[in-house]
Image (cartoon, grey):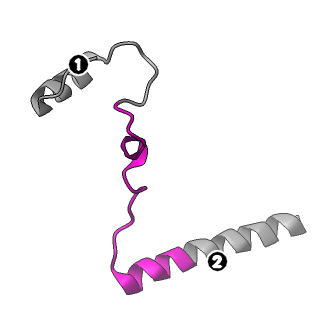
Amino acid sequence: MKIFLITFCFFLLVILGMALGYIFKRREIKGSCGGITALGMEKVCDCDTPCARRKAELAKQGKTVL
C-alpha cells in the first residue's frame, strides 16, 4: 500500500506541474510536430489502397490516389 501511495503522489505532482505550466504560460497543449506526415508517409495504415474518405481528401487536395 505504501508503494501505491508514493506512486499516486508522484503522478499527482506531475499532473500539478503540467497544470501550472499551462496556467502560467497560457499555451495550449499540442501534439507532435507533424506526426507521421513529417516522415513522408501519406497514410497511417498499411492498406494497399486508401479508404473512400481518404480518397476524397486526396482528391480535394489535388493529389493522386495510390
Amino acid under disc 2: Leu
Q: Which residues are magenta?
A: 17-42
Q: Against 57, is 26 above or below? A: below
The residue closer to the viewer here, 65 or 1, is 65
Q: CA distance from mark 2 to mark 1?
A: 48 Å
| Quarter residue 62 falls in | top left
Q: Residues within 10 Å of mark 1 (few under 14, many from 20)?
A: few
Residue drawn at x 67%, y 69% is: 11
Query: Which structural element holds mark 1?
Result: loop
Labelled disc at residue 65: 1
Could you say where residue 9 lies in the image, as x and y percent from the top left?
Answer: 72, 74
Q: Against 7, is 58 above or below? A: above
Residue drawn at x 33%, y 80% is: 26
Quick check: is 21 in the magenta stretch?
yes
Sequence-wise, the earlier of marks 2 and 1 is 2
Furthest-right residue in this view: 2
Query: Which structural element holds mark 2?
Result: helix
**62 to the left or right of 4:** left
The residue closer to the viewer here, 59 or 19, is 59
Q: Against 17, is 37 above or below? A: above
Amino acid under disc 1: Val
Labelled disc at residue 13: 2
